[in-house]
Image (cartoon, grey):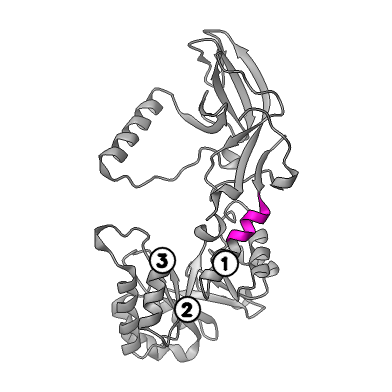
Amino acid sequence: MTFTLYVDEDRWRAHLRSVVETMPGIVPVIKGNGYGLGLARLAQEAAALGVEAVTVGTTEELPVVRDAFGGDVLVLTPAYPRPDEDPTGRVVQTVAHLETLRAATGSRVVLESMTTMRRHGLTVDSVPQLAGLLPGVRLEGLAFHLPIDRHGGYDPAAEVTEWLRRLGAAGVPTETAWVSHLQAAELTGLRAQFPGTTFRPRVGTSLWLGDRGALTARGTVLDVHPLARGEHYGYRRHRTLRKSHLVVVSGGTAHGVALEAPRSVRGPVGRAKAVAVGTLAAANRSLSPFTWAGRQRWFAEPPHMHVSLLLLPASVTPPRIGDELDCEVRLTTIHPDTLTPTRNRPRTAGG
């Protein structure tokens, strides 16, 4: 009995094809946990889509992806190239420092510029030195990693425009630009403005997870225990305040359940919701991502490594052992026990 990610493969692949068809030059991003589907699986899907290149996050992710995909593989995180890293000649390194560029003799590289995202990149001050260092490397283009949020009138296309003009004026070739987080209209405008530049959009979340309805995580009910008022349960021996059912369901921290990154909050409504969640947490009340009988259910206590404990009111008919509960989990942190096509999904009760 496992924590399962079900995939409606026909629906999911139809979405992949539609994105590739409407985004010329797309470069799928394959990194981390493989967006819940695994690095090797995504590399195989990218090969089936017929794209020319993919990206990985780090050099440590290279072996799995490179073995399953026969085209070029760009490493997004800047690294100092080592001769033993690329026996295939298909790896492209990202360069974000002059020192890396000097050490990258003979390597295939893209030059990443420091955008207002401020994560990493070559600075404006380093631009005059670039042209003189390029004869030692195989330049595969320029890279621009841009902020996602557009609030305050921010225009990422204008930022790319400024950089392309600056680099071109310094004698750096601008034939290819690898870009992240640009919308279709912004890409269309840039292609019209720079007809001599091939724009290669690097796309991860909106490609693999763009049709969220094609992917469903579910935990299997392992046990159900009736609890009388005042009974103890869990690691911390909490007491029930009223008659309840304790539901033990597969899916815990090892699977990525209830693991969240901090979120940006804007406006009075967003802040009020954040305060409300914090107040409930202070009272040991946290909603779980599991759903039963049409409602999201409360954690009985923080999730364990492989299972979660849920509390159901006595008025709700509990699930049976073997039933599955939908789990709204973040797919960039999920580690399911099994990955299953929906056509093989068993019938479930309730939910």
Q: How far apart, in angstroms, are the residues tagged by discs 2 and 1?
A: 15 Å
Left or right of 81 in this view: 127: left
Report which quarter residue 294 is drawn in: top right
Residue beneath label 2, please? 110
Left or right of 95 in this view: 18: right
Task: Give the extent of the magenta segment.
Answer: 8-15
On the image, the x and y values in percent for residue 182 come to 41, 67
* Amino acid type indicated by mark 3: Gln
Q: Is 114 placed above or below 109 here?
A: above
Q: How far apart, in angstroms, are the residues tagged by discs 3 and 1?
A: 28 Å
Q: Residue 48: give its label.
A: none
For the image, the number of numbered tags is 3
Mark 1 Cα-neighbour bin, 10 Å: few <14, some 14–19, many ≥20: some
Residue 29 among those drawn in magenta: no
Depth check, front residue: 176 or 94: 176
Residue 205 in sight in this render = yes
Residue 14 among those drawn in magenta: yes
On the image, the x and y values in percent for residue 37 come to 63, 53
Discs 3, 1 touching: Cβ within 8 Å = no
Report which quarter residue 306 is drawn in: top right
Q: How far apart, in angstroms, are the residues tagged by discs 3 and 2?
A: 22 Å
N-terminal of the two: label 3 or label 2? Answer: 2
On the image, the x and y values in percent for residue 138 come to 52, 86
Residue beneath label 1, please? 59
Q: Residue 183: give its label.
A: 3
Q: Which image quadrant: the C terminus?
A: top right
